[in-house]
Image: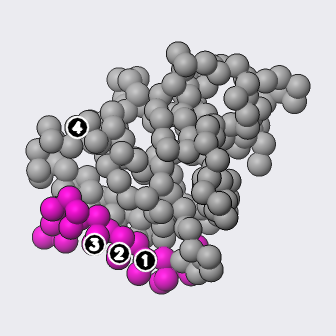
Amino acid sequence: MRFIGAHRHSMLQLNDSLIIGKGSERWCYQHPKNPNLCIKVAVHLPKPGRKPQSEREASYFGLLKRRSIPFTHLPDYLGTEETSLGLGYVFELIRSEDGSVAARLEDLFHELPATTLREMMLELQTYMLRYGVVPCDMSVRNMLVQTHQGQTRLMLVDGVGNRDFIPLASYCLPFARLKIARIWRKFSTKLNLDLTEA
């Protein structure tokens, strides 16, 4: 899928001033022509035998789009564009209602009231179970806290997709829910949070 607004012969120029975040394999840049978009570009090769993270992610987001799920807790994926640093994968840039880029949960984790954190986590968990959104890396580093219509919610902006060699959970909702529930149990134990419904 190519990005619908891209010019065939243009190349986006990316530089350090546009960096939003850095991961182990990819860096995320603000789109130089649209402040409401961001671009993920690979800066390191994946481990031998593993498909590049952006390719896996783009394929999985394409699957979610074909299933017509609501992107209420995920950024929208808009295709690819050529950049000065290689092929970029274009996503919605998550902003809060005041226009600021949404803060990382990792930075706010110890500041948020426990009840607020639990409610946001439960809401994200319910969303993922309902629509079969499988994570490959559940981490507070991959979540943003967005203020929307006076409420706060978690947006899962990275670590989405199924790494299984035979990805049954990508195509069978019951399998997806079993896998998601198992991942969430491990994640909540790691964070020492009770994420069972009251």
Q: Earlier in the sequence, mark 1 or mark 3?
A: 1
Q: Earlier in the sequence, mark 4 or mark 3?
A: 4
Residue 128, located in which quarter of the rendered image?
bottom left
Spot occupied by residue 22 in the image (x, y as percentages of width and height): 48, 35
Q: Which kind of residue does numbered mark 4 sit on?
A: Leu
Residue under label 2 = 181
**Residue 62 visible in image:** no
Residue under label 3 = 185
SS assignment for the magenta stretch, majority: helix
Farthest residue in the top direction? 17
- Judged from the image, the secondary structure of the residue bearing numbered disc 2 is helix
Spot occupied by residue 122 in the image (x, y as percentages of width and height): 26, 61
- Is 14 on the left or on the right of 92, as rendered? right
User: What is the CA distance from the residue labelled 4 to the residue labelled 3?
Assistant: 22 Å
Residue under label 4 = 108
User: What is the CA distance from the residue labelled 1 to the residue labelled 4?
Assistant: 27 Å
Query: How is colour applied across the structure in the image?
Result: one colour
* Dot 4 and dot 3 residues touching (CB under 8 Å): no
**How crowded is the residue under tag 4: few (<14 C-alpha within 10 Å), some, or many (20+)?**
some
Q: Earlier in the sequence, mark 2 or mark 4?
A: 4
